[in-house]
Image (spheres, grey):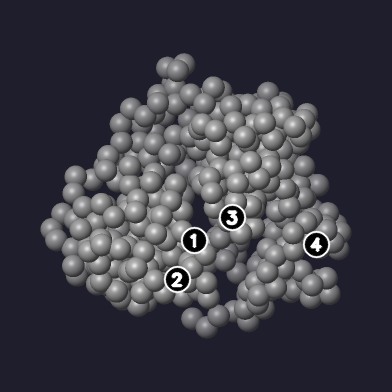
Amino acid sequence: MAPDPLLHRLFRLEKKGSHWGLAGIRALLDGCGRPERAYPALLVGGTNGKGSAAATLERILREAGYRTGLYTSPHLVKFHERIRVNGRAISGPRLRGLLLRFLPLAARRRSTFFECATAMALRHFADCGVEFAVLEVGLGGRLDCTNVVHPEVSVITGISMDHMDVLGDTLPGIAREKAGISRRGRAVITGGRGRARMLVEAACRARGARVVRAQRAAGLVRVSLTPGHMSLREDSGAHYRTALVGDHQVSNLECAVAAARELRGRGFEISEPAIRCGLREVRWPARFEWLARRGVLLDVAHNPEAARCFARTYGATFRRPGVGVVGMLADKDAPGVARQLRACARLWVATAPEAERALSPEGMARALGRAPHVVVPGVARALKRALQERRRGEPVIVIGSLYTVGEAMARLGAHGQSRL
């Protein structure tokens, strides 16, 4: 399909980079009636896991009977995925109408891509009459466009060293940026572990926020784990089942449950059955997503911490190495990711997604070092090679940049049906 010319104009705004600060997004929202004031909102930030936590929170709210908006980034296959109402991605005609309205505003105000996309999402939510919006923070927190809302509750899933060129190269500095989504007098739910969590909590308290540690508010323990499902038990004796798999997801789910209970304390009607149903029904693609019919495992681990979590979950769910396809962006720590992933596959196919910032296939191969690998340019060709190379019973792993995994998903088609 030919690219939509209006979407093409929107993506051209990416070349302008980012304007740090909220003046740009406020100017856009001033021009369309300040729609973010029409509904309560939640902000979900962190280095890893924020998308999973946001998706789980949205599903809990929907199970509680609320009409929901969910804004996430980036997308895997289509831009429409970023803006959802009651779980459904924005339609083509609705998106076209927003683009026709906001692109001229963006041109006059020299807005960035993310400013324009965020303003469109907030306007769409108001137009659709949502009763709650869940916003995944794009980058950092304090100066991110999503921070224009006044959240009922904020969530910070955890932090690690990522986007250091923007957020700084120290954990205290990153913690201060992430803590910027907290609000004086309101609760912030903190996930993660160790020193990083302590730094985030200290930064939030300095801003006057009330810190609620997710692990204390909703302590979950993994009971069983398979490639497609995980069972959990809470200290209270409650049991949960979810399709979000891995010990790293336990912390993200704790964040979502703790935030839902905090909202209940603020007067919103969210029952324990709604929380249980939310965890059972939530789906978040390409987060240790097992396409059983094709024998393909998808994951968007693109920093060393996420790769470490993937490797640990892989070791707990699969009995043998597979064949892996990996491609990343040049501004990521590819050697650090590769060190965590090497043992997961007996053969790696190094490739590159179709993105301006992509690390070359040869660069990915160098990052893999001594791990057995071949170089295949193009994700579609790399996926085809991996499917050909795998032996009976071996999974094919597709991992790395969202661009890499998204291209693979587009080739595999819906529900893992191959178009190769």
**Rendered position, 199 above or below 367:** above
Image quadrant in which the C terminus is located? bottom left
* Image-quadrant location for residue 346: bottom left
The residue labelled by disc 1 is: 332
Comparing labels 4 and 1, the label whose residue is closer to the camera:
1
The residue labelled by disc 2 is: 359
Comparing labels 4 and 2, the label whose residue is closer to the camera:
2
Mark 3–mark 1 CB contact (< 8 Å): no
Q: Amino acid at mark 1?
A: Lys
Looking at the image, is mark 4 or mark 2 earlier in the sequence?
4
* Image-quadrant location for residue 66: top right
**408, 325: nearer the viewer:** 325
Q: Is residue 302 left or right of residue 392?
A: right
Q: Amino acid at mark 2?
A: Leu
In percent of the image, x 38 and y 46: which residue is there?
308
Q: CA distance from mark 3 to mark 4?
A: 23 Å
Q: CA distance from mark 1 to mark 2?
A: 9 Å
Looking at the image, is mark 3 or mark 1 earlier in the sequence?
3
In percent of the image, x 55 and y 40: which residue is there?
158
The secondary element bearing badge 4 is classed as: helix
In percent of the image, x 52 and y 83: which residue is there?
2
The residue labelled by disc 3 is: 164
Q: Amino acid at mark 3?
A: Met
Q: Is there any visible trace of residue 418 in the rendered image?
A: no
The residue labelled by disc 4 is: 24
In percent of the image, x 70 and y 65: which residue is there?
18
Looking at the image, is mark 3 or mark 4 earlier in the sequence?
4
Q: CA distance from mark 4 to mark 2?
A: 31 Å
